[in-house]
Image (cartoon, grey):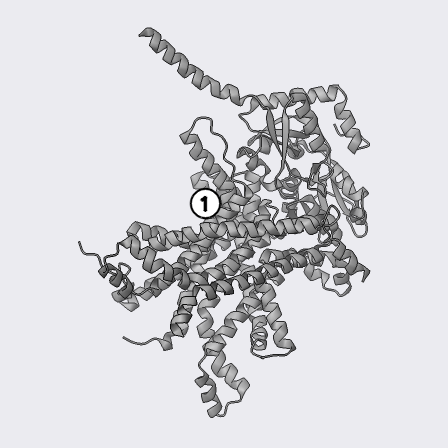
Amino acid sequence: MTTTPHPEAPPTASGFFGEARTGDLVALALAAVIASLVLSDWPVAIGTWLGNDIFVRYWPRLAEGLGVTLQLVAISIVLGGLLSLPLALARFRNRGFASTLAYGYVYFFRGTPLLAQTFLVYYGAGEFSDTLRGIGLWGFFKEAYWCVLLTFSLNTAAYQAEILAGAIRAVPRGQWEAAHALGLSKPVAFVKIILPQAFVTALRPYGNEVILMIKGSAVASVVTVFDLMGATRLAANRTFDEQVYLWAAVVYLLLVETIRRVWDLIERGLTRHLRRRA
Amino acid sequence: MDRIESLIQLLAWGPNGWGDEIAAGTAITVALGIATLPFGLLLGFLIALAKHSGGRTARMFGNLYTTVFRGLPELLTLLIIYYGGQRLIQEVQALLVEDPEPIEVNAFVAGMVALGMVFSAYSSEVFLGAFKGITIGQIEASRALGLSRLLTLRLVVLPQLWRFALPGIANLWLILLKETSLVSVIALPDLLRSTFIAVGVTKEPFFFFLVACLIYLVLAMISSIGIGWIERWANRGERRAGA
Amino acid sequence: MRFVIGLAAAAVALATAAMPVAAKEWKTIRIGTEGAYPPFNFQDSNKELQGFDIDIAKALCDKMKAKCEFMAQDWDGIIPALKAKKYDAIVASMSITEERKKQVDFTDKYYQTPARFATKKVGGFTAVTPEALKGKTVGAQSSTIHANYLEDLYKSKGVTVKLYGTQDEANADLAAGRLDGVLADSVVLYEWLEKGDAGKCCQFVGPDIKDVKYFGEGAGIAVRKEDKDLKQQFNKALAEIIKDGTYEKLNKKYFPFSIY
């Protein structure tokens, strides 16, 4: 009986290619399962077979909710990403209005609960409905879905700006100097040399942000949006059966695990050139 | 100007204003955060120990625990603990005693347990990272000095561990402070919930929710100052050695 | 020897019998209510529970010679919390429906009021059938008979149904223009539409809705299925306060019309 000092010896020793391929397949299979949950109703057939009436009745609502959750997260991550770019740039100015504004923005959205922000936008907009109607924006703020989308985008923009700013800072100074030596102007150097490297550094934190957003998106249910959480609460309230929460838990875990694995896949693909051959 | 004045008056103390209600809510928010912290830290430390030096089963359990509670939306965890936890306790009780005295899972306890479990899942990763900061050489040295495993943990590992873990834990505390707001959904009159009640009566959502957000910001600022102070204190030995 | 066995048997019998007998005495009754449903139950600015439900419960407890303790609970969790023994009875304007009867027992009704739609005075709708409301957005409080009614009969006809944690939030969204209408208890809507400024935007529309399948047989007090004795005591006390005029007095305190 000998105990090894590192029982969790790295599994990569078994051969990189074999490893990677199974991992890729699992990621793709999980993504396919998630897609099938939204697009088809095979779980209902299983529910029928098991004789679970509540599941048969409410699964379609949950599946619809899952679709809403995916939409909310995907759109707000992209919109937030676009907004984060100017925010991150403004953070690099040492002083001035833009820099202070960006700092305040990031501080506010990272320092307050997403739920409070959602209430602020949703009920705040309701209070100013007449003004908003006057300037033609009420059509947007009228819908809880759009209010939530706006709040989520603003929120994730603050987090993404911090990620991006950190990643830009992490690009070695030598890269700037080399670009300068090659005669590239600062903006060109930034877009063509610095930003792509920063994105690679930022990939992992971006992945975490997507997962945090999926979890955070559950607060949409509090302002009448039937996302996965909203549909779950509806079903639980109507059936008085707590098992509904457990189905939702399984779906959320599946979703987060899928994102994690798919993200690993993307990261490996994008950093292929950086990997050393043994 | 009149409008601003009348808004400020809504924050007055006493039966006509909402200042005292919101202050009481803030106290509940802070109390919930502080009550969750030791529970989450201890649990997180145990999970980290299981993942770091436990057997096969312990490691598997630790990893599963972390995956689950970092993957579930905090709101869902909270609802499962609040509604499901109550039922679980009852069924366990029914097995043990005849006619059991009801044990109530109130909103505060449910919030504390749910947030504590999420906190522990994240903090276990922080501790795990901190374990790695303690070099094997130190453990071997203390073995060579004849210290038992427990003494090594107490005298060599823990004093360094908490210093390594401090920045990560501080970050988690700031997240925890924000996440306490979720308990407003299960009717605990925390800061956000009190604000919500005030909005229901005064019909001034924008003003009140903005005030709530500012209070959360102030809590975060106070925390940051406190954290800075603790970090300086924790690293006092380092500084002296370096000087 | 026989004596010893007899004694032991008696002791066991006594020990097992003593428990349920003690449990059947209802000296204190913990009552759960929502506290966000004026005028039936709501919290005043001192966070005291007030309203018709509360007054009825107090009158019943008086008759039952029991002490009432009130606690507020979110509507969504009000039945789960009763089953979880956070309190012993729900006095919160809960309608007696088949769906709920599977979960809890109800006393006789203590009031019955119909449901009604409300809509904007300007730009609202006039007919309230599912067909007429196609393409409109209608709100209700979640986990209520009104929500179920909309979900089951209106949603499939192309009406967008929004559900809120409290009736107040639904009303606020109707006033803001996010909703075209709300469906709620007529007395609760009356309180909002006729008293105070917030409801000035809006008005009743359509007839009273009394579909027994959805709206049940009026509001009753909910107790756990195993507490048959408590249910009986409530029913007895209810009959007494109706007979001696206490009920009528309370009705008049809140409403100019009879709600029984």
Q: Which of A184 and B182 is in front in this view?
A: B182
Identify which residue is drawn at 47% across, 85% down: A176
Q: Nearer the viewer, residue B159 or B166?
A: B159
Q: Mark 1 lies on which chain?
A: A
Q: In the picture shown, does residue C78 fall above or below B204?
A: above
Question: Residue C232 at x, y = what percent?
Answer: 61, 21
| Residue A277 horizontal side relative to residue C57, left or right | left
Question: Residue C138 at x, y = what percent?
Answer: 69, 48
Q: In the picture shown, does residue B172 fall above or below C164?
A: below
Label total for image: 1
| Residue A249 horizontal side relative to residue C244, left or right | left
What secondary structure is found at the residue carrying circle 1?
helix
The quadrant of the picture occupied by the C terminus of chain C is top right
Q: Classify residue C219 by image quadrant.
A: top right
Q: Identify the residue at the far top of this view.
A: C2
The quadrant of the picture occupied by the N terminus of chain C is top left
Q: Can residue B22 be seen in this view?
A: yes
Question: Residue C127 at x, y = what percent?
Answer: 76, 44
Q: Can residue C180 be seen in this view?
A: no
Q: What residue type is labelled 1?
A: Ala
Residue at label 1?
A45
| Residue C2 horizontal side relative to residue A235, left or right | left
Question: Residue A60 at x, y = what percent?
Answer: 53, 48
Q: Nearer the viewer, residue C63 or A32?
A: C63
Identify which residue is drawn at 54% across, 64% down: B225
